[in-house]
Amino acid sequence: MRLAVGHDGVLTVTIPFGVDWSVIERLIESKRQWILSKIKFFKSIDKDVVRVFLKGDYVKHKEEALGLAKDRVAHFNAVYRHSFNKISIRNQKTRWGSCSKKGNLSFNYKILFLPQAERDYIIVHEICHLSEFNHSPEFWSLVEKTVPNYRDIKKTLRRQEFYLK
């Protein structure tokens, strides 16, 4: 089961077929505070700064995002010198980026619409996964090498996850 609160404050509940209504009610009640805090958050943000992504945006911006990702990976990988396979751009709803065990780096096209510091953090984060496929202290030490204020950026980025929807 999944709960999501959209930037418009609407709660969406996704459930497998056949789940009893009482189970759904218990889930919603158990997550009541979380739901209310998300609704309050979305009511507090300036609607003029929330970007609404349209179906065609991915196709329209994919190549530009790929160019940005390749450029920034090259820039930061000059420091790290990790080998990787390929870079791809996706339209994901829950991730800004990912790194596969095969050394493939993938980024959400929506990084184009983030401030430079947040873009760079996402790219560095995935580059560092090429050598540390975890979030250990060693991993964060690698990130800190080129993004010393990564903790602050990470917090800011978490508040902007509604961009992914």
Image: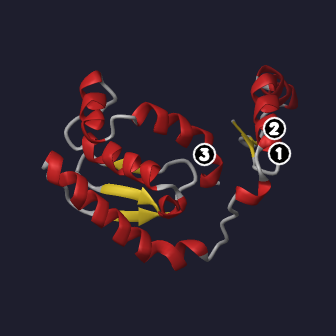
Element class at badge 2: helix
Is residue 165 placed above or below 29 in the rendered structure?
Answer: below
| Residue labelled with disc 1 | 9
Identify the residue shown where x is 50% and y is 55%: 115
Q: Identify which amino acid the numbered label 2 is placed on.
A: Ile
Identify the residue shown where x is 70% and y is 57%: 49
State how far apart marks 3 and 1 are (Cα). 14 Å
Q: Residue 13: horizontal and vertical position, in percent?
A: 77, 41
Tell how many labels: 3
Element class at badge 3: helix
**Residue 133, can we see it?**
no
Q: Quadrant of residue 75?
A: bottom left
Numbered tag placed on residue 161 in the rendering: 3
Q: Identify which amino acid the numbered label 1 is placed on.
A: Gly
Q: Residue 110: horizontal and vertical position, in percent?
A: 52, 61
Identify the residue shown where x is 82% and y is 30%: 36
Are the residues tagged 1 and 2 within 8 Å (C-beta)?
yes
Identify the residue shown where x is 53% and y is 42%: 157
Is residue 160 placed above or below 67 in the rendered structure?
Answer: above
Numbered tag placed on residue 46 in the rendering: none
**Residue 28, can we see it?**
yes
Frontmost residue, 23 versus 123: 123
State how far apart marks 3 and 2 are (Cα). 14 Å
| Residue labelled with disc 2 | 39
